[in-house]
Amino acid sequence: MRMKRIMGVLVAGIVVAGTSQVASAQSSNTEVLAFRGFGATAVFDTVEGCIFTRVIVGASESSASGQRTGEQDSAGVNLDRRNTCTGEVLVSGGGSGLGVKVDIAPNFSSAEVHGVVPVHEAVSDRNFDVAVDVVWTGEGEIERNAVQYSFVDDSVVVRVHQNSSGRKATAVGHVVGDSTEWVPDGTKGDGLLVWSNEGQVLINQGA
């Protein structure tokens, strides 16, 4: 069954690898998908003259109904560096992996991720590992949301229900890779802590 878009744990433009997914075919033309997970995102911006650098770190603890191995930790990194005076893109890369440890406290009071993430950098067409160490501290009220909607994608009817909650956070991080300190130790950034529980029913009308 074909579907172009599956909504999972999405954090500030990063889809963190390792988000769990369970699929069970109920009939020849119907498929059920379920997602459940906690996530944290941090955005770090630095400016040195004309050079602007943005680093986004996402981390998740995810599980799914019927998953016997319990929660799975994963993280993703996006690197972007450009010359704002000339418009030249100097670095553009990203990646995700499971070689991390993620802890998210109850009620989104805090979170942290420590480990190494493999990254592919497109401008130089190189691969390298990036070490991430980020700690989040929740702030403000917890906001909750519940939605249901449906859409059609290439003759597939997708019915979605999603419950989510989250709160803003302050992130403090250190990101190093390829002999470059992308986020100097102790740098503060904007953060978000979230929880999402989602189910989908896919009905293939063309089957």
Image (spheres, rainbow, N blue to C red):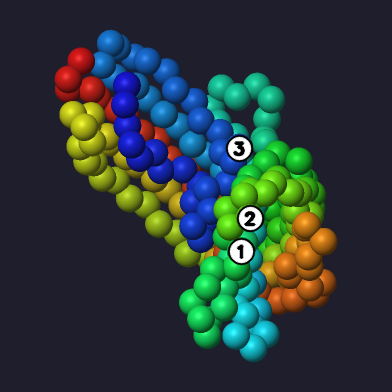
Q: Which mark is residue 142?
A: none
Q: Picture coordinates of residue 87 (x, y %)? A: 49, 77
Q: Which residue in the protein does label 2 denote? A: 124
Mark 3 or mark 1: name the one nearer the start of the chain.
3
In the image: residue 142, left or right of residue 198 = right
- From what the image shows, is residue 117 above or below residue 83? above
Numbered disc 2: secondary structure = loop
- From what the image shows, is residue 118 above or below residue 65? below
Judged by depth in the image, the label closer to the viewer, 3 or 2, is: 2
Q: Which residue in the protein does label 1 denote? A: 91
Write the residue at 42% across / 48% down: 163
**The disc labelled 2 sits on which kind of residue?**
Ser
Q: Looking at the image, which is closer to me, 88 or 24?
A: 88
Mark 2 or mark 1: name the one nearer the start of the chain.
1
Q: Which residue in the protein does label 3 denote? A: 18
Q: Picture coordinates of residue 112 (x, y %)? A: 74, 57
Image quadrant containing the C terminus: top left
Q: Looking at the image, which is closer to me, 14 or 142?
A: 14
Q: CA distance from mark 3 to mark 1?
A: 25 Å
Asked whether residue 80 is in view, the answer is yes
Numbered disc 1: secondary structure = strand
Numbered disc 3: secondary structure = loop
**The disc labelled 3 sits on which kind of residue?**
Gly
Judged by depth in the image, the label closer to the viewer, 2 or 1, is: 2
Mark 3 or mark 2: name the one nearer the start of the chain.
3
